[in-house]
Amino acid sequence: MKLAPASRGGIAWLGLSLLLSLGALLAWLSPGSNAWLDWQPQLAWQQPWRACSAVFVHWSLQHLLANLGACAVVGWFGWAARVPPRAVLAFALAWPLSQWGLLLKPDLLHFGGLSGTLHAGVAVVLVELVCGPETTPRQRRIGLAVSLGLIIKLWSEEPFGPAMRVLSGWDIAVAPLSHFTGALAGTFTAGLLLLGAMARRPR
């Protein structure tokens, strides 16, 4: 039986979310992996793979568990939104772009974790919900409401403040800029692919 594009997209979205989770688990179980996987701006051009591999690095068990839980939520969000296959491609393209955006703060000497790329995934789904031609009015309203919440969250985190910030309840310092660059990367890639798809639609 041939699957509808929305079903194919939802399955692929779950697959990409699972890949991110499994990669993080494997990196956690591999001693010394942080040294060659985490994002380091001074190595961005010599070792560009770090833009992809940094998402697998976690600095504490709390960090890992929180991001695995968030990954499950983002996976469910894309599945529930019935995202088309182009959204999965946008998510994949935003994955490394989220880390490249961290060059805005070269004093952020090390970065690891899924949070930036997961913000990209949320932004991709929101672009589809708000602007996608296949979405219903109800989905569009939900997308607008969640988009407003995301904007408020990003603004409250002051992403252009100190590169690293210690927050109550966390056993590591966090990098708020990664959330902003992730959301920006997801919005950009999803918007670009959506514009391309709409340009190809018969009039």
Image: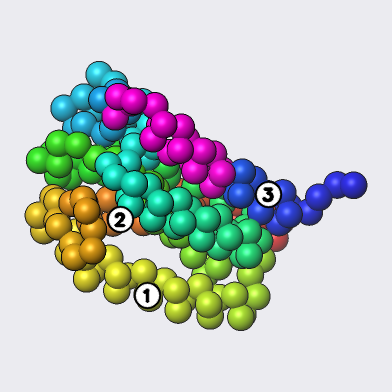
Separation of marks 2 and 3 at Cα, in angstroms: 25 Å
Identity of the residue drawn at 51% across and 38% down: 22
Say which quadrant the C terminus sits in: bottom right
User: On the rendered structure, is 172 left or right of 83?
Assistant: left
Residue 61 showing in the rendered view: yes
User: On the rendered structure, is 17 left or right of 203?
Assistant: left
The residue that disc 2 covers is 179
Q: Earlier in the sequence, mark 3 or mark 1?
A: 3
Q: Is residue 25 above or below residue 84?
A: above
Dominant secondary structure of the residues highlighted in magenta in the image: helix
Identity of the residue drawn at 28% across and 56% down: 180
Identity of the residue drawn at 11% across and 58% down: 161
Q: Nearer the viewer, residue 157 or 194?
A: 157
Q: In the rendering, at what x and y percent does residue 99 appear?
A: 30, 40
Separation of marks 2 and 1 at Cα, in angstroms: 13 Å
Residue 149 is marked as: 1
In the rendered structure, does residue 99 fall within the stretch colored magenta?
Answer: no
Q: In the rendering, at what x and y percent does residue 15 appear?
A: 61, 43
Residue segment shown in magenta: 16-34
Callout 1 crowding tier (Cα within 10 Å): few <14, some 14–19, many ≥20: few
Q: Is residue 51 above or below residue 162?
A: above
The secondary element bearing badge 2 is classed as: helix
Residue 89 showing in the rendered view: no
Residue 186 is marked as: none
Q: In the rendering, at what x and y percent does residue 94 appear?
A: 42, 44
Q: Earlier in the sequence, mark 2 or mark 3?
A: 3
Q: Residue furthest top?
A: 46
The secondary element bearing badge 1 is classed as: helix
The residue that disc 3 covers is 11
Q: Callout 1, which amino acid?
A: Gly
Quadrant location of residue 110?
Answer: top left
Q: Is residue 177 above or below residue 146?
A: above
